[in-house]
Amino acid sequence: MPSSFEIAHSLRRRACLLLAALLLSTPVLGQDVKVIANPTLGLNEISAADLRSIFLGTKTALENGSKVMPVMESNNTLLTTFARTYLGKSAPALQAYYRSLVFSGRGSMPPAFPTDVEVVAYVAKTPGAIGYIRENAGSERVKVLKVR
């Protein structure tokens, strides 16, 4: 008969294998997110580097002189996906980054909304706004940008 240690070890091993299988079957980050912009920006696509710079506050205007402003969705799952995919940060690291900008006086927190509908509404009415929403969310009043 196996000891309690052997049973516990076997259960832990099975749990780790199950977790690994789940992680490997998870869709690639980023494919569930679409980047949107106010139609007045005149963009159809944006580079990943420009998107990162805009959301990290190091770029506030495009090459054509158009002012840009990031808009966030505060849903933690979507924020995590967006931050890891396009910014190379975890959601907590991104929030800490923004707090450091605020406390140092070098920047401010981007507007953040809890739902796709609110993000779309804000981006649609705000010139220069760039945000992100779920891939399957409605985006009729904004322009969907291809990230290259």
Image (cartoon, helix red, strand yellow):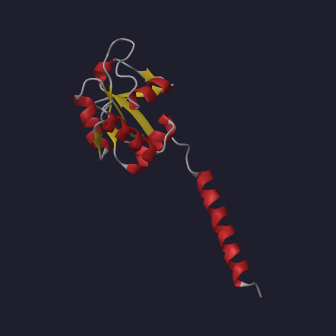
Foreground residue among 144 and 18: 18
Tell me if residue 93 comes above or below residue 54 in the rendering: below
- Residue 148 image point, x, y percent: 51, 25
Q: Is residue 41 visible?
A: yes
* Residue 90 coordinates in the image, percent (x, y): 48, 44
Residue shown at 51%/37% (left/top)?
88
> Hey, which quadrant is residue 138 in on the image?
top left
Q: In this view, does 20 lie to the left or right of 100?
A: right
Percent across and percent down for residue 27 are 55, 46
Q: Which of 97 and 85 is in front in this view?
A: 97
For the point 47% across and 44% down, the residue is 81
Classify 24 as above or below 135. below
Q: Which residue is drawn at 67% across and 62% down?
A: 17
Q: Residue furthest top?
A: 64
Residue 31 visible in rendering: no
Q: In which quarter of the image is the N terminus?
A: bottom right
Q: Which of 20 and 53 is in front in this view?
A: 53
> Quadrant of residue 15 in the image?
bottom right
From the viewer's perspective, tell me whether residue 45 is left or right of residue 122.
Answer: right
